[in-house]
Amino acid sequence: MERVDVQTLRDAFIRQGIMLCFNGPFSATLIEEIGQALRKHMEGLSESQSSVTDVFTAYIELTQNIRHYTTQAGLTGVDAQATLTVSRNGEGRYVVDAGNVVKAADGAALVDRIESLAGLDKAELKAVFKAQLRQPRDPEAKTGAGLGLIDLARRSSEPLSCSLTPLNDGFSFFSLRVVI
């Protein structure tokens, strides 16, 4: 196995403003533990309660979506692992980036959905959120009411951005960026 160059990794984290990085499979317990650590770290930085809440909410939404998707899609091993970082950009805004393996068709549909949300302003996002809230929930649905992605778009200070990189055997790597 190749030795990890921890100093180079540390230097890259510092250069890119990364304050939290996780790579691996998400479990409910792990999501909760990392979330609590993230919240306490941000509170220790004397961040506003709204910033702490927005970053924490983005972290929870992304990690839970990844966990639910990998379980529902039956992904195992390396394909079930995800990567998430929380960093600060040059303007001092928090950036939550997350990525995971998806079925190519699912990834393409998600990119379309995100691109449609990215083209909306705050008032339009609010209207879409309210309209989705009024929709009857499918009792057979294994996930939520479809509000999470819209809520992320509303909390984000920039339009959501994403990428989809083809892998092999009908899979792709999906990445999503939320700037708070």
Image: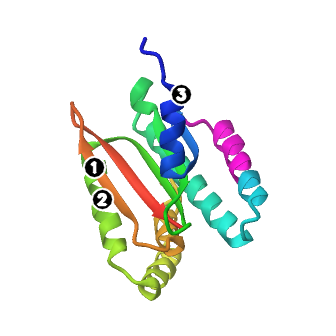
Instruction: Identify the residue shown where x is 44% and y is 32%.
Output: 80
- The mark total stands at 3
> Mark 2 packing: few (<14 Cα in 10 Å), some, or many (20+)?
some
Q: Residue at horizontal 69%, vertical 37%?
A: 29
Q: Alpha carbon of mark 1 to alpha carbon of mark 3: how far?
A: 28 Å
Depth check, front residue: 139 or 39: 39
Amino acid, disc 1: Leu
Q: Residue 142 appears at what percent x and percent y?
A: 50, 50
Q: Is residue 140 visible?
A: no
Between discs 1 and 3, the one toward the N terminus? 3
Q: Is residue 16 left or right of residue 50?
A: left
Residue located beneath label 1 in the image: 164
Q: Main secondary structure of the magenta part?
A: helix
119 vs 135, left or right, is left
Q: Which residue is mark 2?
A: 111
Applied colour scheme: rainbow
Q: Earlier in the sequence, mark 2 or mark 3?
A: 3
State the extent of the magenta-drawn residues as a range. Answer: 26-38
Q: Is residue 88 above or below residue 118?
A: above
At 72% from the left edge and 46% from the top edge, which residue is drawn? Answer: 37
Disc 3 crowd, CA 10 A, few/some/many (<14, 14-19, 20+): few
Q: Is residue 103 above or below residue 3?
A: below
Residue pictured at 43% horizontal, 11% vertical: 1
Could you tell me if the residues under marks 2 and 1 are in contact, i.e. CB atoms within 8 Å? yes
Q: CA distance from mark 2 to mark 1?
A: 7 Å
| Front label number (1 vs 3) | 3
Q: Secondary structure at mark 2?
A: helix
Amino acid tagged 2: Val
Amino acid carrying label 3: it is Val
| Front disc: 2 or 1 | 1
* Front disc: 2 or 3: 3
Q: Which residue is mark 3?
A: 6
